[in-house]
Image (cartoon, grey):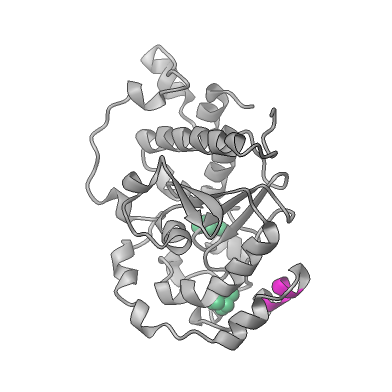
Amino acid sequence: MRTFEDFLQELELLDTFQQLGRMPDEKVPSAIVVVPKVAGHEERAGNNRPPLQAAKTAAVTSITIDPARAARIATMDWAELKAETAACTACGLCKQRKQAVFGVGAAPAPWLFVGEGPGAEEDEQGEPFVGQAGRLLDAVLAAAGLQRGREVYIANVVKCRPPGNRTPTLEEAAACAPLLDRQIELIQPKLIVALGKTAVIRLTGSDASMAAMRGSVHRYRDVPVVATYHPAYLLRSLTEKLKAWEDMMFARREMAKRGASGLENG
Ligand code: URA
Ligand code: SF4
């Protein structure tokens, strides 16, 4: 398992702590930093993204569900699901994408991390979390003793890039839901980490603040879900990075409780 020092290094926090003249206690990192909460923080899911409210107003009433499509997708195997995603035109996000970004990792996987949607670099490369937020996610994974491409699968709520990196609307998330639902069925995760509000809303149905959601276990169908901040949001402040550390420690404990594999050193 990585030490807290490794985590700080990867999040470029090590210098800060060394300047403070002491290292934080691994178990209670937030105890040493008291930073007042900035109102409105929870509303933002990523860098340069509009507040979630803006997207939410567009939503719910206009969702048209095609039950035949959902039923078809629900029986697909992995290869069929990938092909379906690559060719999907079920919502307007297909128009400006370079490619749909299915996910990365091998299925089945004990850990599943779910983000919001591809950004520019992800759209370009076809892999989730390869840009700046991806570097942060890799550090968050390292905090939990995990590594991309091993015991972890990484996916997004929507598979196509929202123009200008805006938050996907609930309608777009709903259009993409059959694909993610089937993907989760095939991944068979023991624990899901929801990265940011878009994923929390999609997976748990709750739009409570992140502050209220983190630190407890929620459910997606039968699968336990742990909520944490979106990696892009972690770029903003030290306190949030420390909370992400706490959330990963919580997720590790939950995974260990379930006797699941997927932790580097047991
Ligand atoms: N942000 C996300 O939510 N997902 C990605 O794949 C990249 C950035
Ligand atoms: Fe299809 Fe999802 Fe892309 Fe919309 S975001 S076109 S539903 S794959």
- Is residue 88 visible in the rendered structure shown here? no
| Quadrant into which the C terminus falls | top right
Vertical placement of residue 199 versus 111, above or below = below
User: Which of the 4 quarters of the picture holds residue 20?
Assistant: top left
The residue depicted at 31 percent of the width and 61 percent of the height is 51
Q: Would you say 213 lies left or right of 71 here?
A: left
The residue depicted at 43 percent of the width and 69 percent of the height is 168
Horizontal and vertical percent position of residue 108: 73, 54
Q: Which of 235 and 145 is in front in this view?
A: 145
Horizontal and vertical percent position of residue 81: 70, 73
Q: Nearer the viewer, residue 14 or 154?
A: 154
Horizontal and vertical percent position of residue 259: 65, 36
The residue depicted at 24 percent of the width and 43 percent of the height is 38
Q: Would you say 201 lies left or right of 98 here?
A: left
| Quadrant into which the N terminus falls | top right
Q: Is the magenta stretch mostly helix, strand or loop?
A: helix
Q: Which image quadrant shows ligand 2?
A: bottom right
Magenta stretch: give its range: 80-84
- Is residue 181 visible in the rendered structure shown here? yes
- Residue 19 sits inside the magenta stretch: no
The residue depicted at 52 percent of the width and 62 percent of the height is 119
Q: Would you say 40 lies left or right of 21 here?
A: left
Q: Which of 61 and 29 is in front in this view?
A: 61
State how many labels appear: 0
Vertical placement of residue 55 versus 188, above or below = below
Horizontal and vertical percent position of residue 22: 41, 12
